[in-house]
Image: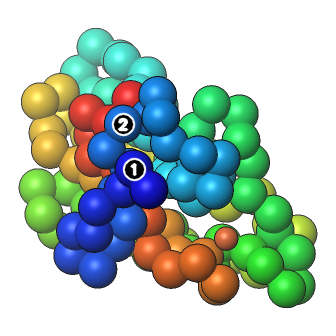
């Protein structure tokens, strides 16, 4: 395993050695820089390894935090594409959590990728 547990969440330690099981659960944080704000786009799965979204196995929610505060929790069901976008000021500290109904919670920090 190449993850640790932080706040009850799995956190990948080294993306280069993480197996697909870990890559497909981890929130991906893409940053699109604007003039005054940065758009943060959260999807699930790193390096193109996607997670299923079926009745039996799916991402239940994404939570997004800025400066340690929960900004929003978005819930998903089978067939949805787990996805969230939020604008933050440059330099803000942010992270995202995601929950799989079978495999628990996964966390990515702003500097994870
Ligand atoms: Fe899963």
Q: Residue at x 35, y 17 (%)?
A: 34
Question: Which residue lies most toward the top here?
Answer: 35
| Rendered location of residue 12, percent (x, y) | 38, 49
C-alpha distance separating marks 2 and 1: 6 Å
Residue under the point 47% across and 34% down: 17
Q: Is residue 43 visible?
A: no
Position of the N terminus, as image quadrant, is: bottom left
Q: Is residue 22 visible?
A: yes
Discs 2, 1 touching: Cβ within 8 Å: yes
> What SS does tag 2 mark?
loop
**Label of residue 14 in the image:** 2
Of 2 and 5, the residue lying toward us = 2
> Residue 4's spot in the image, x, y percent?
28, 61
- Secondary structure at badge 1 equals loop
Residue visible at 81% across and 68% down in the picture: 53
Disc 2: residue Cβ within 8 A of ligand 1's nearest atom: no
Q: Residue furthest front?
A: 1
Q: Quadrant of ligand 1?
A: bottom right
Q: Residues within 10 Å of mark 2 (few under 14, many from 20)?
A: few
Q: Quadrant of residue 66?
A: bottom left
Q: Is residue 42 left or right of residue 64?
A: right
First in sequence: mark 2 or mark 1? 1
Q: Which residue is mark 1?
A: 2
Name the spot of residue 54 as percent of width and height, x first: 88, 75
Q: Quadrant for the C terminus, please.
A: top left
Image quadrant assignment for residue 52: bottom right
């Amino acid at each position: 395993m190449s993850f640790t547990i932080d706040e009850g969440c799995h956190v990948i330690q080294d993306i280069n050695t993480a197996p697909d099981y870990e890559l497909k659960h981890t929130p991906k944080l893409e940053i699109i820089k604007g003039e005054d704000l940065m758009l943060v786009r959260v999807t699930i799965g790193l390096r193109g390894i996607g997670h299923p979204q079926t009745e039996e196995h799916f991402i239940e929610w994404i939570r997004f935090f800025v400066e340690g505060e929960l900004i929003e929790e978005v819930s998903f069901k089978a067939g949805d594409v787990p996805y969230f976008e939020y604008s933050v000021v440059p330099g803000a500290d942010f992270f995202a959590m995601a929950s799989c109904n079978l495999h628990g919670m996964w966390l990515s920090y702003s500097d994870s990728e």
